[in-house]
Amino acid sequence: MQLYVNDEPVQSDIARLANVLELYVRADQRVAVAVNQNIVPRSRWSEFVLNENDRIDVFESIAGG
């Protein structure tokens, strides 16, 4: 299936968001993730099913004040 991760085209047969993110995000890395411009909470990553041409955006969390 064709996906886009941070605007880069990716061919993948992985259907779960958590499994795709394992390839791009370290386990200790604090990130926010959106699929098709909708934020997906970390608690839903393992159950979130991806579809053809989904766009996944990974953002690094930055502390601020």
Image (cartoon, grey):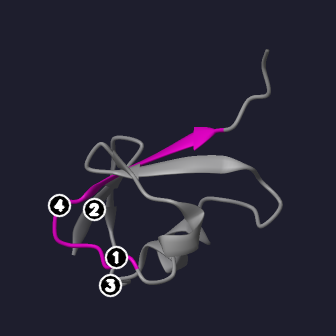
- Residue 57, how many percent across, how many down? 42, 45
If you read the primary sequence from the N terminus, does the residue marked by circle 1 or circle 4 appear first?
1
Distance in Å between CA atoms under marks 1 and 2: 7 Å
Q: Give amino acid for label 1.
A: Ser
Residue 31 numbered mark, or none: none
Q: Give amino acid for label 2.
A: Leu
The residues colored magenta run: 48-60
Do tag 4 and tag 2 residues touch (Cβ < 8 Å)? yes
If you read the primary sequence from the N terminus, does the residue marked by circle 3 or circle 2 appear first?
2
Badge 2 is on which residue?
Answer: 3
Do tag 3 and tag 2 residues touch (Cβ < 8 Å)? no
Judged by depth in the image, the label closer to the viewer, 1 or 4, is 4
| Residue displayed at 78% across by 19% down | 64
- Residue 40, how many percent across, how many down? 44, 58
* Crowd class of label 2 (few under 14; some 14 to 19; many from 20; radius 10 Å): many
**Seen in the image, is 43 located left or right of residue 51?**
right
Quarter of the image where one finds residue 49: bottom left
SS at circle 2: strand
* Crowd class of label 4 (few under 14; some 14 to 19; many from 20; radius 10 Å): some
Badge 1 is on which residue?
Answer: 12
Q: Give amino acid for label 3.
A: Asp
| Residue displayed at 25% across by 49% down | 36
SS at circle 3: loop
Q: Image height check: is 56 above or below 18?
A: above
Do tag 3 and tag 1 residues touch (Cβ < 8 Å)? yes
The stretch drawn in magenta includes residue 49: yes
- Residue 38, how many percent across, how many down? 32, 48
**Seen in the image, is 65 located left or right of residue 54?**
right
Badge 3 is on which residue?
Answer: 13
Distance in Å between CA atoms under marks 3 and 1: 4 Å
Q: Give amino acid for label 4.
A: Asn
| Residue displayed at 83% across by 60% down | 28
